[in-house]
Amino acid sequence: MMFKESTKKRMYRIICLKRSNFDSYKKDDYISEWYKNSDLVYWRENCAGYTQFVEEAGLYSLESLERAGGSWGDWLIEPVWIDIKDGV
């Protein structure tokens, strides 16, 4: 019997800081969770526009981030682990 082994690969979503709206947080809030209640705008695939829907956000490799446009402070990345299927 053949099984498919699942491995994970780390990719990244790009959050556009200029187009996103961020809720302020209180002193006791977890700073690492600041974006959960914010209205984020993501880059689409191949840097082709923007979307407010995480499902429509592009997934970028670390190498492709090195070539991404924008200037300092324009965007930040959100790591995402995706499944890669390999035949065994």
Image: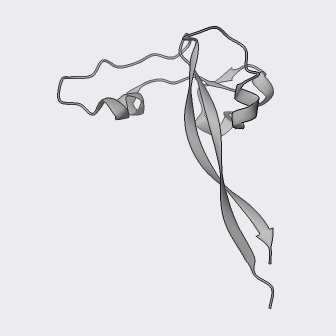
Examine the rendering and report whether any part of residue 6 can be seen: yes
Image location (x, y in percent) of residue 73: 54, 11
**Image quadrant where one finds the N terminus:** bottom right
- Residue depicted at 79% across the width and 68% down the height: 86
Vertical relation: 43 (above or below) 69: below
Image location (x, y in percent) of residue 30: 27, 34
Considering every residue shown, the one lying at the far left of the view is: 28
Count of numbered circles on the image: 0
Vertical relation: 24 (above or below) 64: above
Considering every residue shown, the one lying at the far bottom of the view is: 1
Q: Residue 77 lies in what quarter of the image?
A: top right
- Residue depicted at 56% across the width and 40% down the height: 79
- Position of 21 with respect to 6 (left or right) is left
- Position of 50 with respect to 26 (left or right) is right
Check the image and tell me how it is coloured.
one colour
Examine the rendering and report whether any part of residue 60 can be seen: no
**Image quadrant where one finds the C terminus:** bottom right
Vertical relation: 1 (above or below) 38: below
Image location (x, y in percent) of residue 55: 64, 40
- Residue depicted at 71% across the width and 73% down the height: 5
